Amino acid sequence: MMNSLTATRLAEFLSLSSKGFEEIRKYAETTTLQNVERKVYFRGVIEFSNACEKDCYYCGIRNSNRIKRYCMQKKEIIETALKAFKQGYGSIVLQSGELTSKKNFDFMLNTVSSVKKKSRELDAKDNGIGITLSLGELSKNRLQELFEAGAHRYLLRIETSNKKLYKQLHPCNGKHSFNKRIKCLQNLKNIGFQVGTGTMIGLPEQGVEDLAKDLLFFKEHDFDMFGIGPYIIHKDTPVGKQYEKEWQKKKERIFELSLRMISLLRILVNDANIASTTALQAMHSQGRELGLLYGANIVMPNITPQKYRAQYLLYEGKPCIEENAEDCMNCLSARIKNIGRTPVLQEWGDSLHYFNRTGEKR
Ligand code: SAH
């Protein structure tokens, strides 16, 4: 099956009827269980700042939006991380908008090494909590320093593998460049990070052919982790305004396509970590479970302190704005067990693909 997965073929699969796709979903589910077993790993996401120098046309926290900006203090981030660690979260993701100042970088570096050090003190095995970063594009030297400070995974979405579409979604200035992003992804790999990328599904003027090419891009560039999810409207953004009427009609299909992308990705990259993203949950009350049933093996509950959550609004209708990390953990664990999978606590849950790709020992 693998060799015949051309862009044309993948686009055909994305266009099948629901019934027609079920066979592929089942195949993806079997592939998941064979490669990453029933295990589902948790990453507690801490959205520690919404300050951002970038101006992505689809994003609610883009620089031009006059929203209240916040940045959690180092002490607060450490407390949040350690609390999650004690609750059983084996890994966290530190995510924010993009700031390029030296001051901000030093703050991040400091925070990463403190979280690592303090979590190791709480851990008999001395590993501490697994740290994934999602801070946008940074120079190679800075990424190297963050790696040495104890972060070992990095998420940076390509957003779309179609260069023309990328240009339509981002302002035409030095701050937003497709090639720079690719370069950054390569740097991350060379440094030794487990590298994750992803795209948004359902962007204006994006067709199934583009999505098929996204899948081939993922395979070709040999990434370890993926977070793909539906585009969700945010009305106070250029894309949101342009897309408002159409999106209502399209959103069901966008949701369905997002699930199908997960299945096809699992079939293409068997051993990767694939997230069942928050955006799926935002569109459907069972979104996260469905993501797992279509081939995902990672869940990423939001563990940001409640008072900040409403300010990190990338898109509308973000779920679990009210819940705390412990509620989230209990509710999700039950949901995961319900569909016959096993929530795994206290483990980093690294990407198998990384070890197969590098030959490094687990
Ligand atoms: N600034 C960092 C991380 C924060 S944004 C970075 O750019 O990497 C994290 C992800 O949110 C983005 O990569 C994008 O894919 C997603 N996102 C932003 N706006 C969105 C929207 N309207 N709908 C769905 N996903 C969105």
Image (tube, grey):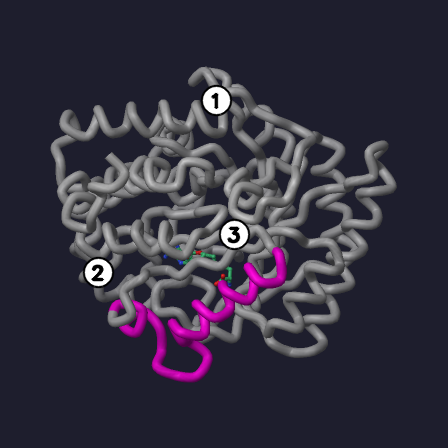
Query: Distance of mark 1 from mark 2, alpha carbons?
Result: 33 Å
What x and y, as percent, mark residue 226? 44, 47
| Amino acid under disc 3 | Ala
Which disc is residue 204 wearing? 2
**Vertical placement of 348 versus 211: above or below?**
above
User: Of discs 3 and 2, which sits in the foreground?
Assistant: 2
CB atoms of marks 1 and 2 within 8 Å = no
Residue holding disc 1: 335
At label 2, counting other C-alpha atoms closer than 10 Å, the crowd grade (few under 14, some 14-19, many 20 or more) is some
Badge 1 or badge 2: first in the primary sequence: 2
Image point (38%, 32%), residue name: 295
At label 1, counting other C-alpha atoms closer than 10 Å, the crowd grade (few under 14, some 14-19, many 20 or more) is some
User: Which region is colored magenta?
Assistant: 165-192
Image point (55%, 45%), residue name: 354
| Amino acid under disc 1 | Arg
Image point (60%, 36%), residue name: 349
Magenta residues: mostly which secondary structure? helix
Q: Is mark 3 within 8 Å of ligand 1?
A: no
Secondary element type, mark 3: loop
Location of the N terminus by quadrant is top left
What x and y, as percent, mark residue 253? 20, 42
Relative placement, left or right, of 298 versus 78 is: left
**Vertical placement of 215 versus 343: above or below?**
below
Residue holding disc 3: 310
| Amino acid under disc 2 | Pro
Q: Nearer the viewer, residue 294 or 321?
A: 294
What x and y, as percent, mark residue 279? 40, 45
